[in-house]
Amino acid sequence: MPELPEVETIRRQLEPWIIGQTVVGATSHPSHKFTPAVEICGATFVSANRRGKFLLFGLDDSRELVVHLGMTGQLLPHAARDDKYLRASWDLASGDHLGFRDVRRFGRIRVAEDGVYEGALATLGPEPFDPAFSPQSLWMAVKKSNRHIKTQLLSQRVVAGVGNIYADEACFLAGVHPGARKLTKAKAERLHDAIVTVLRQGVDNGGTTLRDYVAADGEAGNNQFHLVCYGRYGEPCVACGDELRRTTLDARTTTFCATCQTR
């Protein structure tokens, strides 16, 4: 699933292209997950923002087009109109068009009043690059739960935008066992810094492409070449040389180093 770096990369690429564009027509797949796409005909895009893994496109009528990419979603200018996986398409007054391609149909589209959200978007924790996310806030949040640290990160309530890839990377960098259930203040500080570091690296590298993710320009990301933990089980740890291990935590496959990441 695209995580914060992938979604942020798409946002940055679309922002200068989409602002000022007016929607003159729209089509959608009949599923209720995509039909809201047609509700924005006549509106003009005025902003392109992100919250966690959600894209938020501000409209000139005080509404927002909310797009969640799900597992395989791709938001592409000039997407092929005859693509059988095209789930929504917006025709623009400029003659351009924007398409939402989603092979597995786990993505979704909504239209919201500006800043009035429902569901997961309404319960997100702080943004990782915002001062509201601090070592203290992380430590206090995980103290309230007895769930695995990695599971808490994936909940989106401790910090927004972290998924399986960057959770593994951050726990490894911080020396935190992903299956631990509590953090000391010192480990919370290391994990906080690691989360910010791996997410910034992901953004700088244009996201991680392992299978389906491409940016808005259709190009793959490069962060997969910089991963030191995620998906590398059976390979030597870059820090100690011991073999990285794989386990399942709350139904999520997890890679870690038993030597460097102690409980």
Image: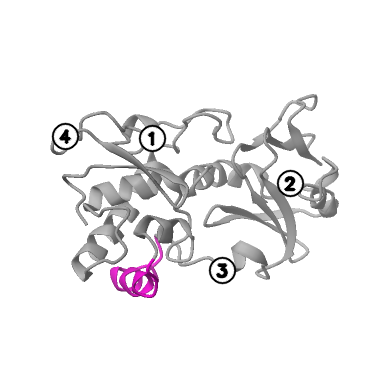
Range of magenta residues: 129-146
- Residue position for label 3: 123
Q: Residue 163 magenta-drawn?
A: no
Q: Which residue is found at the position 72% from the left and 36% from the top? A: 99
Q: Which of marks 3 and 2 precedes in the sequence?
A: 2
In-image side of 10 versus 20 (left or right):
left
Camera-nearest residue between 13 and 136: 136
> Nearer the viewer's eye, disc 3 or disc 1?
3
Q: CA distance from mark 3 to mark 1?
A: 28 Å
Q: Residues within 10 Å of mark 4 (few under 14, many from 20)?
A: some
**Element assignment for label 4:** loop
Q: CA distance from mark 1 to mark 4?
A: 23 Å
Q: Which of marks 4 and 2 precedes in the sequence?
A: 2
Q: Which residue is found at the position 28% from the left and 53% from the top? A: 194
Q: Which of marks 2 and 1 precedes in the sequence?
A: 2
Name the residue type under label 3. Answer: Thr
Q: Which of marks 4 and 1 precedes in the sequence?
A: 1
**Figure quadrant of residue 146:** bottom left
- Residue position for label 1: 223
> Nearer the viewer's eye, disc 1 or disc 2?
1
Camera-nearest residue between 13 and 66: 66
- Quadrant where the C terminus is found in the figure: bottom left
Q: How many marks?
A: 4
Image position of 248 with respect to 181: above or below: above
**Figure quadrant of residue 116:** bottom right
Q: Residue furthest left?
A: 240
Question: In the rendering, at what x and y percent does residue 129 appear?
Answer: 39, 60
**Element assignment for label 2:** loop
Camera-nearest residue between 69 and 206: 69
Name the residue type under label 2. Answer: Gln
> Which dot marks residue 21?
2
